[in-house]
Image (spheres, rainbow, N blue to C red):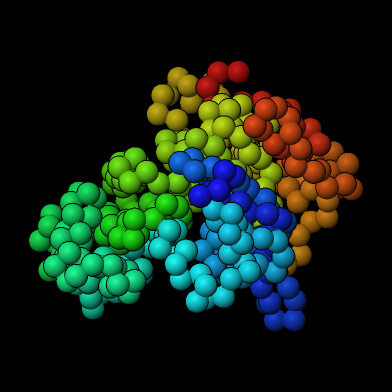
């Protein structure tokens, strides 16, 4: 174990070919995650956050930059060399309906990683499988049933159990509740936090809902059109956003208290996000930004430190003001 961050994303670029053009899904992104830390990665659909998560897992190869896990450069390893490290980093996918094979019993789904890596006898693997299912709130006899016999929330619990099978150190959860009914999202989030504490995990939670990641993260990074535009401790980002895009995401999240909801500032963004194939020049958010000025379309703002532990890429950082709670 190194003394540096458990996960280090260093100036990563990921591009895809679309016809004769190139789409830059992740554009020079850097992000460190310390051992035991809970980091949220948030942004609209198309912001590049899922692509970054898949690149961390080496499902995509970066076109530029490095990804270091516990000091080891994953981008320099071939598939055989990656195999031992794959046990230490696992992913939960967005759609449990698509990520679970309907032809396989739950016990087979959860135990497959252990069988692939040769971890234990048949009896030991079954015992651990049943124990993992119990850890996520499912009965031991679920091992003999099929995914179709479970609800969406229960299917996602099965996915969580599968991700825990190899006792990983890093858990990447890609929109873990967005495909679920609102009524059960809180239950799955609570399960995620319980198993994180129980298994001592470091976590990267990818989501579009800032209010969601607020509950289960220590730090938040906000992405827009392939770039990180703001990072900082969760409380500070949520209650004092410095970037207008962060403030707009918060503005879109409902607040349970009617009085507080009436007092807070509402920020409405007009138009859809620009295409990553042909992004706007300079600041990519300037075409939708409520405080944009001429410099925003002329010079790209760098991601700079604005306070200890906080970084913002905006020429007019902080001018939007808080949008949650009172001014």
Most foreground residue, 149 or 196? 196
Q: Residue at x 40, y 46 (%)?
A: 201
Most foreground residue, 179 or 226? 226
| Residue 245 location (% of width, % of height) | 66, 41
**In the displayed structure, would residue 10 be above or below residue 249?**
below
Most foreground residue, 187 or 70? 70
**In the displayed structure, would residue 51 be above or below residue 216?**
below
Q: Quadrant of the C terminus?
A: top right
| Residue 316 location (% of width, % of height) | 79, 32
Query: Relative to 95, is 105 on the left or the right?
Result: left
Q: Is residue 148 visible?
A: no
Q: Quadrant of residue 190?
A: top left
Query: Relative to 23, is 32 on the left or the right?
Result: left
Most foreground residue, 78 or 244? 78
| Residue 152 location (% of width, % of height) | 27, 58
Looking at this rendering, what residue extends furthest in the left direction?
A: 141
Q: Quadrant of residue 215?
A: top left
**In the displayed structure, would residue 155 be above or below residue 15?**
above
| Residue 269 location (% of width, % of height) | 65, 44
Q: Residue at x 76, y 37 (%)?
A: 304
Query: Relative to 212, is 74 on the left or the right?
Result: right
């Amino acid at each position: 174990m190194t003394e540096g961050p458990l996960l280090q994303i260093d100036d990563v670029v990921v591009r895809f070919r679309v016809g004769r053009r190139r789409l830059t899904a992740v554009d020079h992104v850097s992000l460190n995650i310390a051992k035991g830390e809970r980091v949220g990665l948030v942004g609209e659909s198309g912001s590049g956050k899922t692509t970054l998560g898949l690149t961390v897992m080496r499902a995509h190869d970066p076109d530029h930059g490095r990804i270091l896990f516990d000091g080891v450069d994953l981008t320099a390893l071939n598939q055989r060399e990656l195999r031992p490290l794959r046990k230490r980093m696992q992913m939960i996918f967005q759609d449990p309906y698509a990520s679970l094979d309907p032809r396989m019993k739950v016990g087979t789904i959860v135990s497959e990683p252990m069988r692939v890596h040769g971890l234990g006898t048949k009896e030991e693997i079954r015992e651990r499988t049943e124990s993992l299912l119990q850890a996520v709130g499912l009965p031991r006899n679920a091992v003999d049933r099929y995914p179709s016999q479970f609800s969406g929330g229960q299917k996602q619990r099965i996915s969580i159990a599968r991700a825990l099978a190899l006792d990983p150190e890093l858990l990447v959860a890609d929109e873990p509740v967005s495909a679920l009914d609102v009524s059960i999202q809180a239950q799955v989030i609570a399960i995620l936090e319980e198993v994180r504490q129980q298994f001592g995990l470091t976590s990267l939670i990818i989501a579009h809902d800032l209010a969601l990641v607020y509950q289960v993260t220590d730090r938040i990074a906000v992405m827009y059109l392939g770039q990180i535009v703001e990072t900082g401790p969760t409380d500070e980002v949520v209650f004092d956003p410095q970037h207008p895009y962060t403030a707009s995401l918060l503005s879109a999240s409902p607040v349970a208290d009617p009085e507080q909801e009436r007092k807070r500032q509402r920020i409405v963004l007009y138009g859809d996000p620009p295409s990553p194939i042909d992004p706007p020049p300079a600041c990519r958010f300037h075409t939708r930004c409520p405080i944009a000025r001429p410099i925003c379309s002329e010079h790209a703002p760098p991601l700079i430190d604005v306070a200890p532990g906080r970084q913002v890429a905006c020429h007019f950082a902080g001018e939007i003001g808080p949008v949650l709670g009172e001014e």
